[in-house]
Amino acid sequence: MAPGKIDGVPTIASYFAACAYLEAASVIAFRAMARELAAHGAPPSLIAACKHAAMDEVRHARLTARLARRYGANVIWPRIAPGCPRTLVDMAIENVVEGVVRETYGAASALVRAQSAARSEIREIAHAIARDECGHAELSWKIAAWLDSQLSREDRARVAACGHAAIAELRHELAIEPACDVHTVAGVPTSKTATRIHAELVSCIWANSDVLRATS
């Protein structure tokens, strides 16, 4: 296998292909969240915001897929069959893991990529995505607050425990150094920068979250 390549494809191409896949998966997730919130009687503003976020993710998927193809990757799209509405606690667990933790870190990381990517086109795309992802992270916190208000003490404790586990898992993942071209071309933070961002989020945001310490 050649340096900087995975199965013959440059790692930067694989990176953008993975981004496109995840953005498309987010379309499905936000649409599902909108349906489930509606089924559980959530405020209309949250439902509308999820639908708007799904539209953002459609645009992100197209932009990152274009970059992936430009660097030589084939993009695979997720296929997830719709299921029955989940329980409130299951929704809250997914939201705290994927939204409150990972989306919040992702928004902060996207801001770095928007400044550090090598090419102006990639910086512009990263900037547009970063702006939207900051809004999506904020939405995740709003959803978390509403779900928290609907849960029992025991279920809130479960959600908080899952959130802390996600924070620890993310910290472990960020210890892995990104491929050189992924760092230089896409602006993905080095492990040192990523762990610093993570530590700042822990001390400034996650440690002060009622959702992550909810026991009453």
Image: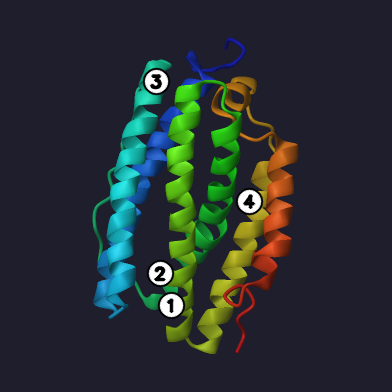
Tag nearer the camera, 3 or 1 = 1
Residue that mark 2 sits on: 91
Question: What secondary structure is found at the residue carrying circle 1?
Answer: helix
Q: Which mark is residue 170?
A: 4
Question: What residue sits right under mark 1 in the picture?
Answer: 147
Q: Of marks 4 and 3, which one's residue comes earlier in the chain?
A: 3
Visible residue check, residue 175: no
For label 4, count other residues whose C-alpha is less than 10 Å away and answer few (under 14), some (14-19) or many (20+): some
Given residues 35 and 185, the one toward you in this image is 185
Q: What amino acid is labelled 1 in the image?
A: Leu
Residue that appears at 67% across and 72% down: 208
Which quarter of the figure is the N terminus placed in?
Answer: top right
Label 3 or label 1, whichever comes before in sequence order: 3
Q: Is residue 54 above or below residue 60?
A: below
Task: Name the image quarter holding the C terminus.
Answer: bottom right
The mark that comes first in sequence, 4 or 2, is 2
Residue 48 seen in the current view: yes
